[in-house]
Image (spheres, rainbow, N blue to C red):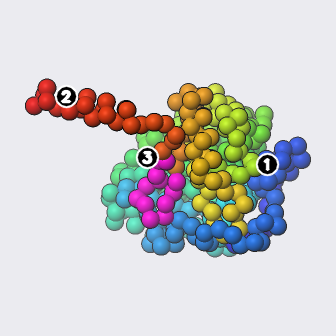
Amino acid sequence: MNLEVKITKHLEKLAKKSPAVRKQFYFSPKELKGKGKSLDPLREAKHSPVKGLIHRYQNRALILLTLNCAAYCRFCFRRRIVSDIKNGALTDEDIQNIILYLKKHPQINEVIISGGDPLTTPKLLEKLLQRILELKQIKVIRISTRLIVSDPQKINNNLIRILKLVKIQPLYLLLHLEHPDELTPETIRAIKKLRSTGAVLLSQSVFLKGINDKVETLTELFEKLISLGIKPYYIMHNDEPIGTKHFTVAFKKEIKIMTALRKRISGLACPTYVYDDPRGKCKIPLPLEFDYSFTRVRLYNYARTYFIKNS
């Protein structure tokens, strides 16, 4: 369990005026109580056939390019390994082993590059992308990052050049944002630079107790994101690694919030609310508080009538 605090000057400045940001990046004594599910709540180690690669889903593979981050989120579900700089960055041999594994599993047509934060190691990212782009089987590339929040000035021309290497395959950038306070002028400038790559920008968020577990907070966040050209993709229940239970919001409350959001904001701005079950084959969309009974009857009758007409 990582108890080390790593913070950037950007976040240090922001945390002085934003309690929501401070709670995300500064150590709390509550972490010492050891409450949570396990060190590896998604059982990633079980699905890692070679170093740096996780293969949980049939057609997708996750590559942990580095375990380095610009700053450490206190709720990180990989807190067991993030900050392991010595063993965390992939070597040329590791990358070769990953490429060989992908070739042996041609059903894998999508890769997600994550970590740590892959945008913190641009040279390594470029090297990996060049190798992946040689594989005709890979049709989609995703890159997950929080650098726009933790150190937005690092989104520089060199990084934009590297991201633009992905020309044939669609490039999706998954930006991790939790609270509207994170959308500073510096972060907005970084987002605009990322848009210039032609990549599709998506966001993912985690429900965090005392940080974003309010309808008003998430309304502001998601509406701002969609106005910046970022499609809110997922909002997830806390995976709850050891030491992070104090961040967990009750499912019942999350469902109420998401139901209210669905009524309040456009479908374009509303992310899918999911739970990542380590035993599952996908992230599970959770139902909201709507009365589906009458709709089910009508849909059944419509489908039945349609079938009879076309039989």
Residue mark closest to the camera, 3 vs 1 = 1
Q: Identify residue type, mark 2.
A: Thr
Rounded to the nearest whole Å, what is the CA distance between mark 2 and mark 1? 54 Å
Q: Residues within 10 Å of mark 1 (few under 14, many from 20)?
A: many
Residue underneath mark 1: 21
Task: Name the element at disc 3.
Answer: strand
* x, y percent for residue 132: 45, 55
Question: In the figure, 54 relative to 134: above or below?
Answer: below
Rounded to the nearest whole Å, what is the CA distance between mark 3 and mark 1? 32 Å
| Residue 283 covered by magenta stretch | yes
| Left or right for 14, reference 290 | right
Task: Name the element at disc 1.
Answer: helix
* Res 61 → quadrant: bottom left
* x, y percent for residue 94: 52, 70
Residue underneath mark 3: 140
Residue under the image location 37 percent in, 59 percent down? 58
The foreground one among 66 and 223 is: 223
Q: Identify residue type, mark 1.
A: Val
Q: On the rendered image, what quadrant is the C terminus found in?
A: top left
Residue underneath mark 2: 305
Residue under the image location 65 percent in, 68 percent down? 36
The foreground one among 100 and 246 is: 246
Q: Which residues are magenta?
A: 275-286
- Our reading of the magenta stretch's main secondary structure is loop
Residue 237 bears which disc, if any?
none
The foreground one among 230 and 152 is: 230
Residue under the image location 53 percent in, 65 percent down? 42
Q: Identify residue type, mark 3.
A: Val
Residue under the image location 88 percent in, 43 percent down? 17
